[in-house]
Amino acid sequence: KHALLFPLSVSRSTGLHPRFVLLLCFISTAACNTFAFTEEPSDRGGKADGYCSRVLRAQSNRKEGNSEFRLRVEGDPESYQPGSTYRVTVTAASPSYFRGFTLIALKDGAEGDKDEDYAGNFQIIDEEETQFMTNCPPAVTESTPRRRTSIQVFWTAPPSGSGCVFLKASIVQKRIIYFQDEGLLTKKLCERDTTDKPLLDCCACGTAKYRVTFYGNWSEKIHPKDYPRRANHWSAIIGSSHSKNYVLWEYGGFASEGVKQVAELGSPVKMEEEIRQKGDEVLTVIKMKAQWPAWQPLNVRAAPSAEFSVDRTRHLMSFLTMLGPSPDWNVGLSAEDLCTKECGWVQKVVQDLIPWDAGTDSGVSYESPNKPTVPQDKIRPLTSLDHPQSPFYDPEGGAITPVARVMVERIARKGEQCNIVPDNVDDIVADIAQEEKEEDDTPETCIYSNWSPWSACSSATCEKGKRMRQRMLKAQLDLSVPCPHTQDFEPCMGPGCSDEDASTCMMSEWITWSPCSVSCGAGTRSRERYVKQFPDDGSICTLPTEETENCVVNEECSPSSCLVTEWGEWDVCSATCGLGMKRRERMVKMPPADGSICGAEVLEVEKCMMPECHTIPCLLTPWSDWSDCSVTCGKGLRTRQRMLKSPVELGECTEELEQVEKCMLPECPIDCVVSEWSEWSECNKSCGKGHTIRTRIVMLEPQFGGDPCPEGVQRKKCKIRKCNRGQGNSDEKKRRKEQRDKRRSKQGRAEGNSEHPGCRMRPWSSWTECTKICGGGIQERLMTVKQKFKTAQLSSCKDRKEIRACNVHPC
């Protein structure tokens, strides 16, 4: 096959025109072999005497404006980033095809006769389709000459300072060899200027509303090295739409304190504070919730999104989020300009994101210990050659696989627009329709189900059609308030007709899994699908057409083991929403040879997660005012209520309908509490006029304004007899004293015998101290039982206590 691009020295030795030789080689392999022995000696490991340059100089005439063949760099960049890897494709427009090709990357102005003339490196994707040219190693050519409509390879851009590069392709088709220096088979890429350029002023009118959606693609399957299984997450997303006078973050700049806290801690609080301090420089603050874990299928968790607006002065959009755990690694957009040169608003931006280093921590792996970078470094993108311990390390310096994708879509325009090149009518109508649907005017008295998925488009071609979705009115709580429509329509076109579908390819369903590669033990099985329709924009369909997975036919291969079939497909999940179960089965093909029972599992059950269940909200009245406190003083309770407005038929409402809380009023007054009055004391005179008293004591002092204590002492007069005067009177006193003592002695004996029969009492104790120093107090004394006789009665033999008043003089 390499005779297609035979060295021109063959033609010199034969006298034949070079183009004739090339054409002859294509027509007849035998004829080509005739000249093979005259090929000049060459080193198979490198270029031979300018072989590549002679290939480049071999050109043939072609028609101008030929658009059958095209060389394309994925993403259609206008410049290259040094060291980045790009997908390069060569395609033929239907019904054209090509049999052979040559692809090179040449520095601007170079002839191709030296190694230094070639820029970057190609990488083979499919060895059955492409290979490096034997006599010109920098070039890529076909592996087998056959009809084909496309090929693809990777190209890694050269290092910084390499200048502009020409990617050139040659095509062999229908006995004609096309080498093209210009047009669709040549792509010129110059090194991206990383110096700061002043942002252009925006000339658009009105405002535009956008939705930004973040698709995290950081998973163990795509980024397996050292992937943190337990704590992987994306932090809360923070950003804004802003003017060119404000920079949230940028490559080559230093991280602010807000950026540092997002990068190291995942906290957006300081960043939001910095954004809001910018005042009129910011139009909208963009916020999205954190994602734990970092990746889940979209049918389990919707991609986070937020809406924001831009205007003529604040037409830039920036955001960032941390991938955690990590030292200080983030992804995001910096000053993405949504204003076009034509004074309009960008329709859609889709960008893959690779992580960048905030320059505040020197860790090299996901879970490196904190190691502050002092002094602080500039913000820079991570590369695959940063450190061998980096999870993104690649010794060959390949590009880092993106960890996320962000999509910014325009959803509405407001105000008078002034773009010089207006959008098509359908686009403008869509904007108006979006504005009309922007406000949800569904009354709260109308309870609906979720919208159904959109139906297929009524048009299978590029003619305008419609598609429909429906929802069900489950309850109308107020018949006087009408409920909006239950059907929704929007314009559509057939597959591949819209801009969104231009680069997508339609795939068939997966074909059933093949049998396991082994009949006993662990093996593999595969399944396939095919491309039903290639992308209309000529791009390559990158979706996989084959899948392989491990399979176990029989875990043990022994006489006591049984032969079972492969597992069948999983049944449908038992739940239509939320958590459910699914099962799969297999059958016993052959029982154990030794006659034992087959121990292999034939049924497998596991959990399955469906989209979150739609719950009907409880329709409630507002809370009532708090009731009065249940007490007039001190600690009590108060309550408030709300009513359920939605019917009971809609399901049980678990929201609380009553709330209770404590309340505190001023302390309640406490009145004074006193004891009962004591017995009246003996008269304080033995003759003549005297007085006797009784007392009571304060048991509880008054508090918080309670009633004061009443009197504690009462007096009353007492008169025993008149007193005698003179000596006689003195003798009379003595006589009465002797009689009194005698009477008391006799009374004491009587008390010991009559009052306490069968008891022997101890003498009276001393009087206690007076309870008050003035105003009337009391004293006590006790007589206790010393001995009880057998004849004593329980009720008569007991301790005695006496009380008397003391300190009765006023205070």
Image: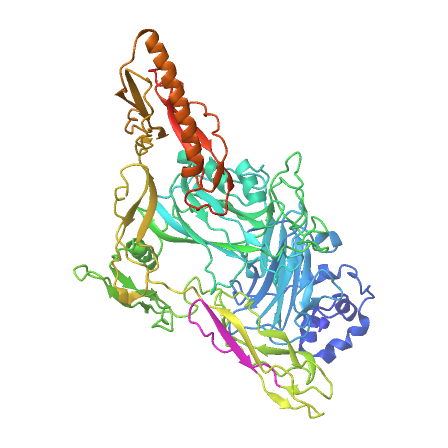
Q: Is residue 786 visible?
A: yes
Q: Is residue 389 left or right of residue 285?
A: right
Q: Residue at x 79, y 61 (%)?
A: 46
Percent position of residue 116, x then y = 73, 51
Q: Residue at x 42, y 51 (%)?
A: 306
Figure quadrant of residue 151: bottom right
Percent position of residue 497, x then y = 41, 67
Percent position of residue 557, x then y = 72, 84
- 613 or 750: which is nearer to us? 750
Q: Residue at x 39, y 70 (%)?
A: 494
Q: Is residue 797 left or right of residue 540?
A: left
Picture quarter with the C terminus: top left
- 701 or 684: which is nearer to us? 684
> Residue 154 in magenta?
no
Picture quarter with the N terminus: bottom right
Figure quadrant of residue 699: top left
- 718 or 136: which is nearer to us? 718
Q: Is residue 184 left or right of residue 272?
A: right
What span is in magenta?
Answer: 565-585
> Residue 580 in magenta?
yes
Q: Is residue 779 visible?
A: no
Percent position of residue 40, x then y = 81, 66
- 749 or 229: which is nearer to us? 749
For the stretch drawn in magenta, the main secondary structure is loop
